[in-house]
Amino acid sequence: MSCFGCIGQDNELDKRRKSSRYSSNPNLSEGRSVRRKESALKTSLQIIEELSESTYGLAIEGKENKPYEAQDFFAFKEILGSGVVAVVFRAYFKPTGKVYAVKFISNLKQSRQFVSRELTILKLSCNCKYLVQYHSHFRVGTNMYFVIELCDGGTLEELLDHKFLMPPRLGRTYLRELASALMYLHSLKFVHRDVHVANCLLTSTAHLRLSDFGLTRTVDDPNGEMMTICGKAAIRAPELYLDKLCGFGLDWWSMGIMLYRFVTGYYPFQTEKLTQGFQSVTKLKEKYPEWLFDDPHTTDLCQKLLEKDPKQRLGYQNEAVEIKSHPYFSGMNWNVDENIENVLEQDLKTVSKQYIPVFKRILRILGAHNHPLLGVSEGTRDSDISITQMLARDLESRNIAKKLTDFLSLSAAPNSDILSKKNLASSMPGSGV
C-alpha cells in the first residue's frame, strides 16, 4: 500500500498555488483557480471525518440512526469489473429505479488511503464532464460503497481488443477528452498515475470518462516529488524507474503510450518484467513504422509525449497552451463535444478496412443498429484477428507475419533507423527486391 501515500496538506500550500506551472488553463482567473484548490482541500478534510464514522451515507425513511445494509438501497446485478481492492457492480437504485455502477470495497481499514483519494476526486468530478460522475457513497461497517455514473459503453481496452487500431479522427477526439480531464486534475494539483485504456470508460453516447482514482496523489512541489513505482507496467514513465522527481509529466507520458497503442495496436516498450521494463523504457527508443505513422502531426505529438526527460516532455512548462496548440489537435473545439457518429462518418471517408471492427463496436454502443456499415463483410473474421495477422494475410507470408511481430514488439537497439514498408519488404525471402 506504500504507493497510495497521503493527501498533501503542505503548510505553504497557498504560496505554491501561485506557481505558473500549475495553471493548466490560462483563461481561468487566478481567483477561480485558488477556489478550486481550496475546494479540493476542504473535500479531502471532510472525507477524513466521514471515514471515521461507523456508518455514513444515504438515509432511509424510518431507519434514521439504525443499522442498514447495502441491499436497502440497491438491487445488485452483474459484476462489471474488479481490481486489487474493489469490485464494481451494475445496480438499480431502489428509490428512483435508475441504474448506476456501485464500487464495493470490502476492507476499509486496509484501503483507507485508496478510498480517501478516490472519494476526493469523485466529489469534485461534477466540475469536469470527462471524469466519471459521482452520485453518492455510503459505508456499512468496514465495507465502503461508491455510487457512480454507469458507463455502459465499456472501456477503450474492450473497444481495442485483439489489437485493433483506433480510427484517426476518433482517436483524436478521445485524446482531446482525456487531455481535458487530465488538465482539470492537474489544475487541482492531482496527478492520476494510472492513465491507460482500461481506465477510460465510454458512455452510451460513446464519449470518454476517466475513472479509477485510487493511485491519484497531490504534487505540491513545483519540481516534482519522489514516488514509488505503481500502476500498469506498460505506462510507467522513465522517471519512476530512475527514482527521479515525478510530476504531472507522468500522465502526459501515459497519454503518449495510449496514442502509440491507438496507431499500432501495441505498446512501445517491453515491460513484462521489472528489469526488462527498466532497460526498455529508460534506454531504448520507440520506433515509428512509416506505414502506420503516416501523419507527421501524430508522430510529432507521440514523440514529444514520450520524451524521456520529463523537463523536455510536452506539457512541462504550460500544459494547457502546449497541448491545445499542438497541430495534432488543430481545428478541434475544446469547449464543445463532437457527435461521435459524425466523427465516424468523417473517418469512413478516408480510412481503410482495418478500422471496421472498431466502427461497428462504436455504432452498437450508439444504438445505430440500422447503419449500413454493420452489414459490411469483414472477410475472414477480421473482427477476431490482430493488425499483425491482417498485414501478414495481405502479404501472404507467415515469415512476414513473424517479422512484423518482431518489429512491432520494439526489441531493436536504441536509435535504430525507422524502417519503411519498402525496406521491410526488401528484407523478406523471395521479395525480388
Image (cartoon, rainbow, N blue to C red):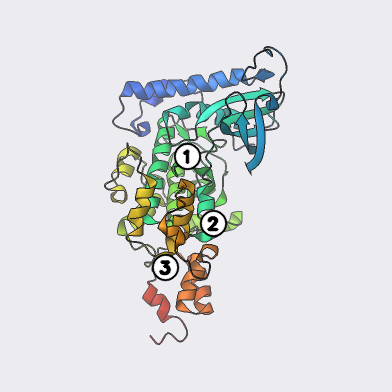
> Residue type at mark 3?
Ser
Position above or below: 111 against 194: above
Q: Picture coordinates of residue 71 (x, y %)? A: 69, 27
Q: Which residue is mark 3?
A: 416
> Callout 2: helix, strand or loop?
helix
User: Relative to the observer, which residue lies in front, 366 or 354?
Assistant: 366
Q: Picture coordinates of residue 83 (x, y %)? A: 64, 42
Residue, x 53% and y 42% (percent of image)? Answer: 152
User: Relative to the observer, which residue lies in front, 196 or 21?
Assistant: 196
> Callout 1: helix, strand or loop?
strand
Q: Picture coordinates of residue 73 (x, y %)? A: 65, 25
Looking at the image, can residue 309 be seen? Answer: yes
Position above or below: 181 against 169: above
Give yes or no for contact between labels 3 and 1 (Cβ–Cβ under 8 Å): no
Position above or below: 380 against 225: below
Residue, x 57% and y 33% (percent of image)? Answer: 100
- Give me the C-alpha separation between circle 3 and circle 2: 29 Å
Mark toward the viewer: 3 or 1: 1
Q: Which residue is mark 2?
A: 161
> Residue type at mark 1?
Arg
Q: For residue 209, which numbered disc appears in the image?
A: 1
Q: Picture coordinates of residue 176 (x, y %)? A: 37, 44
